[in-house]
Amino acid sequence: MVKLLELWKLATELISVKMAALCAEESIYNLLPRIVEKPLKAPRYVSNFTPYVKRTIEQSKAQWKTIGPAKVQVPAPKDFLRKHSKETKLPKRKKDKGGKKMSQSAVPKITDHPIMGVQCTKNFISTNAANVIMGVAKKPQKLCVDRKQGDKFVLETSGLLPKYLKKKDYGVTPKYVIKRTEEAKKAQEAYDAYVRETLRQKAMKRLSDEERESLLEGLKKNWEEVHQAFQSLSVEIDTLPKKLNKERLETQMKQLEHDIQTIEKHKVIYIANK
């Protein structure tokens, strides 16, 4: 209860303080208009070098760097582009003395009379007869009728007339075909020559009798050397190097014996060129 009483006292004191403040603000003098005093601004700073900078800029600036060169004649506002001003205009038609427009091809007037008394001395009858007698008869056009109703068409453009047979170059081989055939023939000859040269280079060479005998003697001499080395081996082979050496010598002897038998068996031997 004591705490509640203390809180109530504090609230009443706050309310009384606020009311006192509001009552203090309320005054009749507050209704009078107040003159707001504007703060005075300090004078603007102006550099002493401003005229010098302006004069320097004017000296270094060209006339065409702003809006164009100086003293240019500006077009008048009345000289704007008007409608149909760029279209071509026809010349005006001439008028007669009476004020009427004259037509291009005037109709003959009633007062105009043709030229009279002009006569021609040419005899048209004899001229026409001479032209008919001396003229070449017109050849009839070749037509083809394909129906009984009489439908006909020109025979020359129909494809039924063998006019291509009568050409001078009919049946003659064209030049481009002859040229192409010659080129193909030359290419085939070059290829055949290349094949023959390749086969000749890769052809097998036959050993002569002297070469065969010398080869046999060399193989037998090698076999004797290997056999002598094999005979020189120790009787007891108890280590791995000795065993490998013995196997190598046996392999060489077998290969030499096989080569000697092959050469002695075949008298004609060919060797392929690599």
Image (cartoon, rainbow, N blue to C red):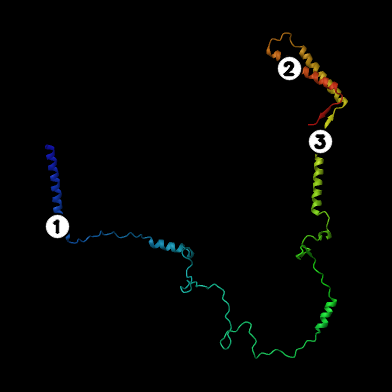
What is the CA distance from the residue labelled 1 to the residue labelled 2? Answer: 136 Å
Q: Which residue is mark 3?
A: 199
Crowd class of label 3 (few under 14; some 14 to 19; many from 20; radius 10 Å): few
| N-term-proximal mark, 3 vs 1 | 1
Crowd class of label 2 (few under 14; some 14 to 19; many from 20; radius 10 Å): few
Nearer-the-camera pick, 211 or 15? 15
Q: The residue under label 3 is which amino acid type? A: Leu
| N-term-proximal mark, 1 vs 2 | 1
Relative to 160, residue 92 above or below: below
Q: Which residue is mark 1?
A: 27
Q: The residue under label 1 is which amino acid type? A: Ser
Residue at disc 3, secondary structure = helix
Viewer-nearest of labels 1 and 2? 1
| N-term-proximal mark, 3 vs 2 | 3
Nearer-the-camera pick, 245 or 113? 113
Relative to 124, residue 22 above or below: above
Q: Which residue is mark 2?
A: 248
